[in-house]
Image: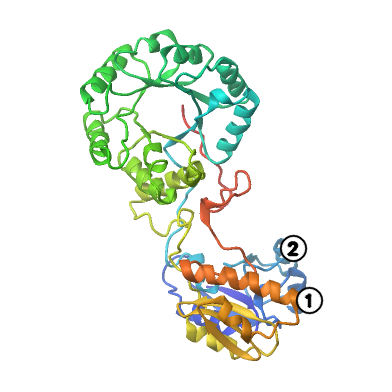
Amino acid sequence: MEHILFLTGHLAQPALERVLAGMDSTEGEQPFTWATHDLGVQVAALMTADMIRRRLPAPVAAQRIVVPGRCRGDVEALTEHYGVPVQRGPEELKDLPQHFQRQAKPVDLSTYEVAIFAEIVDAPRLSVEAIVARAHELARDGANVIDLGCLPATPFEHLEDAVRALKAAGFVVSVDSQSTDELLRGGRAGADYLLSLNIDTLWVADEVASVPVLIPREPSDVASLDEAIAAMQARGKPFLADPILDPIPFGFTASLVRYHALRQRHPDVRIMMGVGNLTELTEADTSGINALLFGVAAELNISAVLTTQVSPHARRAVREADAARRVMHAAAQNQTLPKGLSGALATVHERHPYTDTPAEIAATAAQVKDPNFRIQVSPLGLHVYNRDGERIATDAFALWPQLGLQGDGGHAFYMGVELGKAELAYQLGKRYVQDQPLNWGVAVERAADDLGAWCAPGTTRKKHDE
């Protein structure tokens, strides 16, 4: 049986041992025995690789060493030094059980089925260079297809140049217009998709090689959509069908029924769903709306979603769509609820906001012998403690007179920033970790192609199969 050595600090050692003692050793990884070692630091998060090398003699009586998740330095060098794997654990002790796969099996979120068409709604008003730059931003956030949105009564003289520039840059391109002339121009310039054709304009599909998205004459006219589908099937050409998602309260529920009925009538047809009528026209957090709609897409085996990010409240729509399609695909594939798979879409609240109970915080506070302030959050509010004791309040301003920092501007500024974050976390039910930014999921900017928030390590985006 594997024996694992967990390195920790003086304050965290009792809590670490409680968590390890309570872990179920019959699930997840193979059962193991464990020991903890206090490296001689008060705060485990301050541990570094160099410190470990100096203070932990080699060899160690273990087959693996686990260090705190915030340990800085080169743990691969420690692996070579000690001759056993040295790994970082989770950032929070309470996350150890899931880290060791004892509460949930790991789910691969690197794959998806739904292609994201991201529309540049004001393309006629942008230069070709600006269109290409916008396309790169959308692709970074997860778009598979760049949709050029044409505007009524607005000339798009550089449409062909825009299509060619996007194609030259390696993008898959669609042209979205109510004008058959613009659709023809876009198709002849090399657009991969045309949005949208109905039974009356289906002739356009005979003039160009672009794949059409078929829609009904009117949203309620499902017969005309079926007619267009039959016509394309007779031609033996590829297409997508979109029965149109209506906004609330103008037929949203009826439009959901249309999607379900379309899938029932045509089990093998590729379907598109345009979600902008919900995300753009509902003043609510779009992460939840996208989660729900991509859940519908997973159940109905929808092939593509058209999204926009025009309204400021929908400015993360593509990124949210990317996370939602992965989570819902994983839930469908594994036949599990879309819960506990990723926190990327839980931008405002968290499932497990509090890492310690008030009693556990009090026990830790009682051990502190130095003047440095520690801050934690529990259901009771904000806990601030050092050698002078513990203070608890739900309002950061209520704590200020108890800190004695009136003559220390730098420390006062630091505590003000941290207490402000802690109060916000308490009010919203988010996890607070001192000196760390709050986790807002996909609601904030991230580095290009950083899928670490919801993908397994070492995985990459699945290419959309055209």
At label 1, which amino acid type do we have? Arg
Residue at x 53% of width, y 84% of height: 392
First in sequence: mark 2 vs mark 1: 1
Using the image, determine if residue 411 lies above or below residue 76: below
Mark 1 neighbour density, 10 Å: few (under 14) some (14–19) many (20 or more): few
Image height of 188 relative to 125, above or below = above
Q: Nearer the viewer, residue 153 or 417?
A: 153
Answer whether residue 58 is visible to the viewer in this image: no
- Indicate the position of residue 407 as horizontal and vertical percent values: 75, 82
Q: Quadrant of residue 254?
A: top left
Question: Is the residue 284 above or below the residue 405 in the image?
Answer: above
What is the basis of the colouring in this image? Answer: rainbow
Residue underneath mark 2: 77
How far is mark 2 from mark 1, CA to CA? 13 Å
Residue 203: percent from left, percent from top: 35, 9
Q: Identify the element where label 1 is drawn.
A: helix
Left or right: 245 as drawn, with respect to 279: left
Q: Report the side of 316 relative to 78 (left or right).
A: left
303 sits to left or right of 317:
left
Q: Identify residue for label 1.
A: 54
Q: Which mark is residue 349?
A: none
- Could you tell me if residue 167 is visible in this image? yes
User: In front here: 46 or 85?
Assistant: 46
Q: Which residue is pictured at 64% across the width and 78% down the height?
A: 8
Report which quarter residue 178 is drawn in: top left
Q: Position of residue 257 (x, y in %)?
A: 23, 38
Identity of the amino acid at label 2? Ala
Secondary structure, mark 2, is helix
